[in-house]
Amino acid sequence: MMTGYATVGDAVRAMKLGAYDYLEKPFDPDAAALTVARAAERRRLRDEAASLRRELEGIHSFHNLVGKSERMRDVYRLLEQAAGLDITVLLGGETGTGKELAARAIHFHSSRKERRFVPVNCGALPPDLVESELFGHARGAFTGAVSAKAGLFEEAEGGTLFLDEIGELPLATQVKLNRVLQEKESRRVGDNAPVKVDVRVIAATHRNLRSEIQSGRFREDLFYRVNVFPILLPPLRERPEDVPLLAAHLLEKHARAMRREISEFEPEALRLLTSYAWPGNVRELENAVERAVAIASGPTILARDLPPELAIPASLLPPGPVLASMPYRKVVEQAQDKVSREYLVALLTEFHGNVTKAAARAGVERESLHRLLKKHGLRSDEFKGGD
């Protein structure tokens, strides 16, 4: 605003109406240019902040949980319902299915979206400090507590606290957590004064908590306190029709992050992606796509750019429930052993047990082939026969 009759009252009214500053005539042109530059910079920063907020809302939208399968459409509906209800939610599902992403989506579509989303991995908290981390502690509560500290419940005030892997909490902490959820107030370790907390809790676990209750590792009262609105995220092997969509989404994401001009998968690469069982779920798929983007030599992801375990036929893998209970490395090693044995059987059958010819075809030394045969319990004379 420019005026020749400036008063304090005029300046205050101009600011309230949206003016950044005011210039009183006569003014110095350099000072005026500096004021305008500052106003432009302020506008730029405001526009960037608005753009960032729109981007964040997009990142945490339900539809960032990519998928068009019926299973995922059911999940979307439940997440939307949960976002509109200020109640405790329990997210279940195998490791890597996107439980934290789902929790963030609920928060950013809820009435608490302007306040903090505080995630914590309960399994990563040291057992002797877990209560201090969650509920805070008073000064002198234990050795090393040189000052009072607010817990994560207090940090999440007005917002959402995401308790990932809640089944990993010690039983003593489960008792205190149940009380906090019931009373809506927390007590710092070493302090008897309660602190009122207004926090929405979203919990997640890959465990079957009902089985954990039976085995005495999870409290039944806490289970009913957190299992108000349960949502189960399906494993990737149960929605294979979503793999191409997810792979394309992840390809775009990582190609942009690495500034690489890669836009598609060759048909064989896509076939491998869709036929693999994905024991590590979406997290493993993302790792495979990110690796492929990093090592690809052209604008297309080729089959050779993908991890070698993807070439293992699904028929050689254990059934789904067994597969999900096994460590990733063991699954790959077992499948590779099965593939190796089948290859050796086919090779020796082709050459009627002639190890020299079989080794030449396989491209290995004769001694190496003998070691492989011994490892897999095969004898060359079992395959000898007339042509």
Image (cartoon, grey):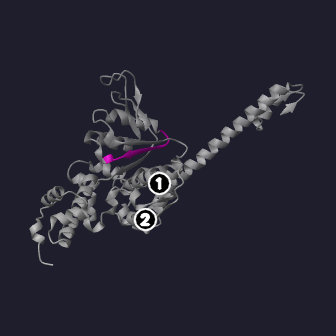
Taking 116 as reference, is 283 left or right? left
Count residues near mark 1 (Cα–Cα under 10 Å), then give few for <14, some for 14-19, many for 20+. few
Instruction: Give the x, y percent position of residue 260.
Output: 52, 51
User: Disc 2 or 1, which lies upstream in sequence?
Assistant: 2
Q: Residue furthest bottom?
A: 387
Instruction: Give the x, y percent position of residue 310.
Output: 34, 60
Count residues near mark 2 (Cα–Cα under 10 Å), then give few for <14, some for 14-19, many for 20+. some
Task: Specify start and end residues of the magenta stretch as a single range.
Answer: 157-166
| Quadrant of the rendering where the N terminus is positioned | top right
Is 327 above or below relative to 114?
below
Between 190 and 5, the residue placed more toward the observer is: 5
The residue labelled by disc 1 is: 297
- At x 32%, y 22%, the residue is 144
Judge whether residue 116 can be spotted in this image: yes
Frontmost of labels 2 and 1 is 1
Under circle 1, the secondary element is: loop
Is 163 above or below relative to 193?
below
Under circle 2, the secondary element is: helix
| Quadrant of the rendering where the C terminus is positioned | bottom left
Taking 217 as reference, is 28 left or right? right
Instruction: Give the x, y percent position of residue 197.
Output: 44, 38
Q: Quadrant of residue 357?
A: bottom left
Magenta segment includes 54: no
CA separation in Å, label 2 and label 1 = 17 Å
Judge whether residue 230 can be spotted in this image: no
The residue labelled by disc 2 is: 270
Residue type indicated by callout 1: Ser
Taking 348 as reference, is 38 left or right? right
Instruction: Give the x, y percent position of residue 167.
Output: 30, 48
Residue type indicated by callout 2: Leu
Between 384 and 66, the residue placed more toward the observer is: 384
Q: Quadrant of residue 261?
A: bottom right
